[in-house]
Image: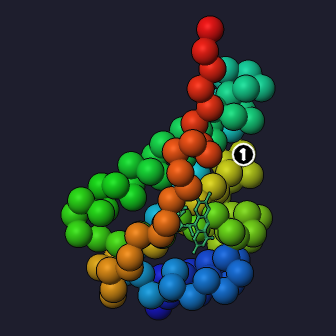
């Protein structure tokens, strides 16, 4: 019952992305700004801890997919609300919500920008 309430409140914090509530498991990936700043100063606090979570998030997606599970990277949510719902201390920053479940459908892959628009080559 309590779990259901938490997921419902997360849906609201995430601007009504209702599929979050449908997933049996919801992972919230957080950055530890303080720990990162202790090792790496301002760059650790403002950049490395976010990069760390991005790598972790990608790994979660890839591992889930390899197990036949579906996920979604949810970055659109009100951070402070998520903190309050999950009792996350203020020095910890929730970065992504990842609902995990067996996919109801297999979507077609979205189109990709051509590599020439993504990679810049410089000759020396
Ligand atoms: C930083 C970030 C935030 C995202 N936030 C959301 C989100 O709030 N809701 C959602 O449905 N998808 C979200 N997505 C997932 C994208 O909609 C898309 O499914 C995903 O990026 C894969 O497609 P792409 O490789 O074409 O970008 C997010 C993706 C990223 C990278």
Q: Where is mark 1, residue-wise?
A: 91
Q: Decide if residue 52 is on the left or right side of residue 81.
A: left
Relative to 118, does residue 5 appear above or below in the rendering?
A: below
Residue drawn at x 70%, y 70% as measured from the top left: 77
Residue drawn at x 31%, y 62% as measured from the top left: 64
Quarter where residue 81 is shown = bottom right
**59 or 25: which is nearer to us?**
59
Relative to 6, does residue 33 appear above or below in the rendering?
A: above
Q: Residue furthest top?
A: 124
Residue drawn at x 62%, y 8% as measured from the top left: 124
Question: What is the secondary structure assignment of the residue under circle 1?
Answer: loop
Residue 78: horizontal and vertical position, in percent? Answer: 75, 69
Q: Residues within 10 Å of mark 1 (few under 14, many from 20)?
A: few
Instruction: Tell me if the residue at label 1 has its CB under 8 Å from ligand 1.
Output: no
Q: Is residue 26 visible?
A: no
Q: Decide if residue 81 is on the left or right side of residue 103.
A: right
Residue 4: horizontal and vertical position, in percent? Answer: 50, 88
Q: Is residue 101 visible?
A: yes
- The colour mode here is rainbow
Residue 98: horizontal and vertical position, in percent? Answer: 49, 66
Question: Which quarter of the rendered image does ligand 1 occupy?
Answer: bottom right
Q: How many marks?
A: 1
**16 or 104: which is nearer to us?**
104
Quarter where residue 36 is shown = top right
Relative to 39, does residue 117 appear above or below in the rendering?
A: below
């Amino acid at each position: 019952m309590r779990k259901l309430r938490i997921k419902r409140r997360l849906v609201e914090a995430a601007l009504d992305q209702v599929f979050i509530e449908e997933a049996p498991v919801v992972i919230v990936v957080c950055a530890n700004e303080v720990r990162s700043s202790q090792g790496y100063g301002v760059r650790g606090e403002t950049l490395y801890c976010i990069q760390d979570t991005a790598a972790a998030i990608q790994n979660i997606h890839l591992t889930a997919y390899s197990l036949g599970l579906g996920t979604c990277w949810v970055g659109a949510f009100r951070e402070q609300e998520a903190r309050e719902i999950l009792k996350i201390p203020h020095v910890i920053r929730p970065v992504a919500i990842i609902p995990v479940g067996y996919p109801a459908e297999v979507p077609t892959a979205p189109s990709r920008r051509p590599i020439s628009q993504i990679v810049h080559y410089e000759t020396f």
